[in-house]
Image: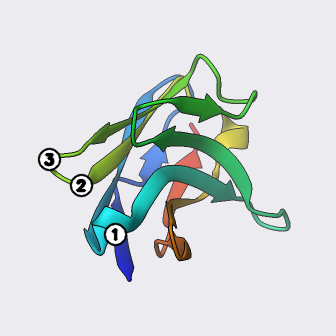
């Protein structure tokens, strides 16, 4: 099993910046890729960004050029740097680990973009 713990959420002003962290533990050798998803009230959970073991990244069109996903393999941690956030980025952000045995999810962290 893989355990994921997110941190770094909170209130941020439009145009500001925020960094989310996701620390993985457990059977981390089984992780093939990690990512961030988000879910706003009344909406389904949507992809934000993913990163593979080799560092290849993929982004939702809505965040390209503003958000950056990265990973520190030594710390088993994945980050989401959110620059120039917009009110429509407000959501609960979930960390995801794609493993040999299936997907694992963190508990989620709230991000609110508001002035």
Dot 3 and dot 2 residues touching (CB under 8 Å): yes
Observer-nearest residue: 68 or 13?
68
Instruction: Return the mark for residue 74.
Output: 3
Question: Label 2: how many residues lie within 10 Å, few (<14), some (14-19) or many (20+)?
Answer: few
Sequence-first disc among 2 and 1 = 1
Determine the CA span between mark 1 and mark 3. 16 Å
Please tell me whether residue 31 is drawn above or below residue 75 in the rendered image. below
In the displayed structure, does residue 68 sit left or right of residue 7? right
Q: Assign a secondary structure to mark 1.
A: strand
Q: Assign a secondary structure to mark 2.
A: loop
Say which residue appears at 43% left-offset and 54% top-offset: 10
Observer-nearest residue: 59 or 93?
59
* Quarter of the figure with the C terminus: top right
Say which residue appears at 74% left-offset and 62% top-offset: 45
Dot 1 and dot 3 residues touching (CB under 8 Å): no
Please tell me whether residue 71 is drawn above or below residue 105 in the rendered image. above
Instruction: Return the mark for residue 51.
Output: none
Say which residue appears at 37% left-offset and 70% top-offset: 4
Q: Label 2, on which residue? A: 76
Colour treatment of the image: rainbow
Q: Label 1, on which residue? A: 5
Question: Label 1: how many residues lie within 10 Å, few (<14), some (14-19) or many (20+)?
Answer: some
Q: Assign a secondary structure to mark 3.
A: loop
In the displayed structure, does residue 4 sit left or right of residue 87? left
Horizontal and vertical percent position of residue 32: 46, 54
Sequence-first disc among 1 and 3 = 1
């Amino acid at each position: 099993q893989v355990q994921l713990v997110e941190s770094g959420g909170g209130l941020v002003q439009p145009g500001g910046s925020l960094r989310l962290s996701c620390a993985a533990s457990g059977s981390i050798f089984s992780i093939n890729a990690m990512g961030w998803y988000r879910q706003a009230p009344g909406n389904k959970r949507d992809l934000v960004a993913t990163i593979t073991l080799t560092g290849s990244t993929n982004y939702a069109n809505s965040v390209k050029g503003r958000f950056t996903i990265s990973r520190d393999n030594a710390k088993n941690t994945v980050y989401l740097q959110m620059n120039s956030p917009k009110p429509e980025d407000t959501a609960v952000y979930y960390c995801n680990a794609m493993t040999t045995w299936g997907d694992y999810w963190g508990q989620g962290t709230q991000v609110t973009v508001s002035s």
